[in-house]
Amino acid sequence: MKSAHLLIATLTLIACNAYASDADTLSRIKSSGAITLGYQETAVPFSYLGDNAAPTGFTWEICQKIVGSVKKTVGRNDIAIKSQPVTGQNRIPLLVNGTIDLQCGSTTNNKERAKQVAFATNTFYTGTRFLVKSGAGIGSIADLKGKTVVSTVGSSNLLVLRRVNKERNLGMEIIAAKDNAEAMLLVQSGQAAAFGMDDILLYGQRAGSRNPGDYAIIGDAIQVEPFAIMLRRDDPEFKKLVDDTISGLMKSGEFDAMYKKWFETPIPPKGITLNVPMSQPLRDNMKTLSDKPAL
């Protein structure tokens, strides 16, 4: 009987240690010698495929700085960086189950998602607007009454559009595309009258199109929301490292330089320029260093 109790206790201890190891991201990275970064393939300019089909972008670059901090903290300069493409639909499950350690894309920090994951200090602020064909006679959300509007699967924008559609009795047919590129194609082909998404991502899609002048971004922002890097919950040591890295970038002026690089100058692979100056909410957050979610 004692041996049975001892076996049960041992197995319980092993299970608890395994759980602790999974929860402790820095320990996992140190022991495995690798960190896995999730990225989106079409979220220009946050994370997307650039030259040589390799991940690049504003948030991706911030994550490289975080990796540098991780190497110093765990005392291993040989930590390998693995990349994992994610979508709006699978990014949270892949983070929760340990497939990725950081989600380096364009994810809205909101209360619903915070029930499953943690968010670092906010690094961008955006609002839901619409991309339409120029000359389509659409200048506001009211002009979309009864029309087909597309957004992307797993995005907070899809939920915002459904709520507003119901509240304003607009009768829009709201459909979901797998990613931003597919949503853009639906507008190009006339299968959707508008693409509702974070305005900064719409600017990226328009700038990267064959004829940017064929498209307009219209309407007042329905809801202003912060973007932030996602990480697993209940890992305060790793969150502090991530937040401290971002804080350091913001205080040193390096964050400003990175912003200008990705939002105000030509970016790969096509050399497009978004021409999006830093917003006042983001400037304010560089002082407050808040990870406050959207309402």
Image: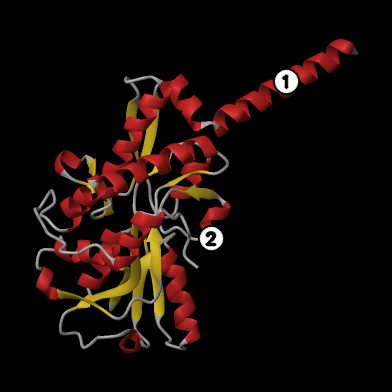
Q: Identify residue type, mark 2.
A: Lys
Would you place residue 73 above or below residue 92 in this image?
above
Image quarter for residue 85? Answer: top left
Q: Secondary structure at mark 1?
A: helix
| Residue 32 image offset from top left, x and y in percent | 44, 21
108 or 148: nearer the eye? 108
Q: Quadrant of the N terminus?
A: top right
Does residue 68 appear anywhere in the picture? yes
User: x, y (%) of residue 158?
Assistant: 42, 68
Q: Residues within 10 Å of mark 1 (few under 14, many from 20)?
A: few
Residue 88, given in percent of the width and then of the height, sits at 40, 55
The residue tagged 2 is: 111
Q: Nearer the viewer, residue 115 or 238?
A: 238
Q: Quadrant of residue 75?
A: top left
Measured Cα–Cα span from mark 2 to mark 1: 36 Å
Q: Nearer the viewer, residue 129 or 211?
A: 129
- Amino acid type of the residue tagged 1 in the rendering: Leu
User: Horizontal placement of 232 versus 194: left or right?
Assistant: right
**Marked residue nearer the N-terminal end (2 or 1):** 1
Q: Name the quadrant containing residue 22.
A: top right
Q: Which residue is mark 1?
A: 11
Q: Is residue 265 left or right of residue 26?
A: left
Query: In the image, what residue occupies the spot 40% across and 73% down?
Result: 223
Q: Kindly identify the residue that appears in the image at 41 percent across and 56 percent down.
A: 288
Q: Residue at x 34, y 79 (%)?
A: 148
Pointer 2 with pointer 1, Cβ within 8 A = no
Disc 2 vs disc 1: which is toward the camera?
2
Circle 2 residues within 10 Å: few <14, some 14–19, many ≥20: few
Q: Which residue is depicted at the point 27% across and 69% down? A: 186
Q: Secondary structure at mark 2?
A: loop
